[in-house]
Amino acid sequence: MAGLAQVQAQPQVTDQSVLPEAASRKTESAQKGVLETLSLRDGLAGTLTKQGKYEEAERMLRQTLETREKVLFQSREDPEVMGTLNNLAGVLNHREKLAEAEAINQEILKSSQKVMGAEHPDTLIIMNNLAEVWACLGKYDAAVELHRQTLNIKEKVHGKEHPDTLSEMGNLAGVLGRQGKFDEAEKMHKQALALQKKVLRKQHPAIADSMNNLAAVLGRQGKDKEAEVLYRQSLELSETPVQRATTLGNLARLLKKQRRYDESESMYDETVELARAIWGPKHPRTFSNMREYVEVLMYQGRYEKSEVLQREMLKIAEAQTAEPAKLTV
C-alpha cells in the first residue's frame, strides 16, 4: 500500500510540473493569436483609410489600441502600439480632428526617436505626418522646417530617387505652395514628378497625386492650360475614390474660374456624390464642394437644382447649430 501510494504520488508531481508549461504554451499561443488579429486590424484600417472610410477606420484603430494597452498591457513605446497610434493620428487628420492628431504625433515622435532612433524609417514617417498636421493647422513655418529635416534625412538614408524621398519632396512642395512660395513649390513638384516617372510604374497612384499637386500650384499662378492638362492626366491615373474626388473638385474649380460652367457642373455633381460617400454630408470638404456647386448652378440659372442643394446644406447647418444648444440645456 505504501508503495502504491508512492507510485500514485509520482505522476502528481510530474503533472504539476507539466501543467504550468502546457498552460504557458497555451497562453503564449493565445497571445500570438491576439497580436496577429490586431496586426490584421491595423492593416484593414489602413486599407479603409485609403478608401476614405475614415469613421470605420478610426473606430477599428481605437478598439485595437484599447486591446493593446488594456488586454496585452503593451507600452505606448512599444513599436506595435506606436504603429497603431500613428495610423490613428493619420485618420484623425483626415477627419480634421487636428488637435488630437497633433498631440499623438508629437508623443510618438519622441518615443520613436528614443526607441528606434532619429533616422529609422518609422521615425521619418512620423516626422512627415506631424509636419502635415502642422500644415493643416496653418503652422506653415514649423511644417516646412520639419519637412526639410525629414527630406534631408531621407536623402541620406534612402538616396535622392527613393519613392519615400520623392514623396517627402512633394509634401514639402505642397506646404510651400500653401505659403504662396509658388516658384519654389513648382520647381520642387516638377522635380519630384520627373523622378517618380523614372522610378515608379507608369500607373502608380503617387504619380497621380503629384500631377494633381503640381496642377494646383500652376492654377494658383494663372497657368490654367498647363494645370488643366495635368488634372485630366491625374484623373486617368486615379485609383481610389479619395484621389478622384480631390482631383475632380480641383478641376471643377479651375473650370469654374474660367466660366466653363457646363463642364464644371458635371464635375461638381460627381465630386459632391463622392464626397458624401467618403467624408459624409457634414464634413467641411463636402460642404465646401456643395457650396461651390450651388454657385455654378446659380450662374447658369439652374435654380430648382440649386434650391435642393441649398435646403440640404441649411438642414445640415441648422442641425449642427442645434447640437451645442442641446448640450447646454
Image (cartoon, rainbow, N blue to C red):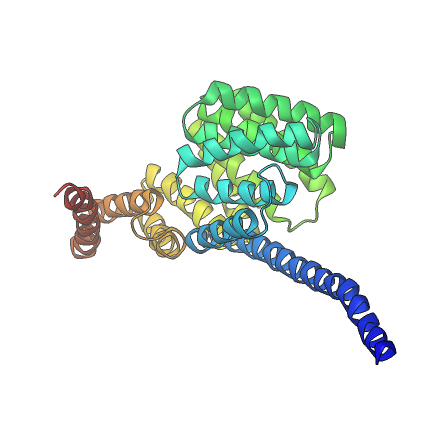
> Measured from the top left, where is residue 159 in percent x and y?
76, 30
In the rendered structure, the answer to whether residue 298 lies left or right of residue 54 reads: left
Q: Which residue lies furthest to the right in this view?
A: 3
In the rendered structure, the answer to whether residue 133 lies left or right of residue 31 reads: left
Pick whichever, 264 or 75, lies toward us: 75
Quarter placement of the C terminus = top left
The part of the image, by quadrant, that contains residue 2 is: bottom right
> Measured from the top left, where is residue 302 in percent x and y?
20, 53
Q: Residue at the spot x=68%, y=23% of the render?
A: 152
Quarter placement of the N terminus = bottom right
> Measured from the top left, where is residue 269 in percent x and y?
33, 54
Pick whichever, 188 or 15, lies toward us: 15
In this orientation, does residue 223 appear?
Answer: no
In this orientation, does residue 18 appear?
Answer: yes
The relative height of residue 171 versus residue 229 in the rendered view (above or below) is above
> Measured from the top left, where is residue 285 in percent x and y?
35, 43
In the rendered structure, the answer to whether residue 67 lies left or right of residue 195 reads: left
Q: Residue at the spot x=62%, y=54% of the render?
A: 39
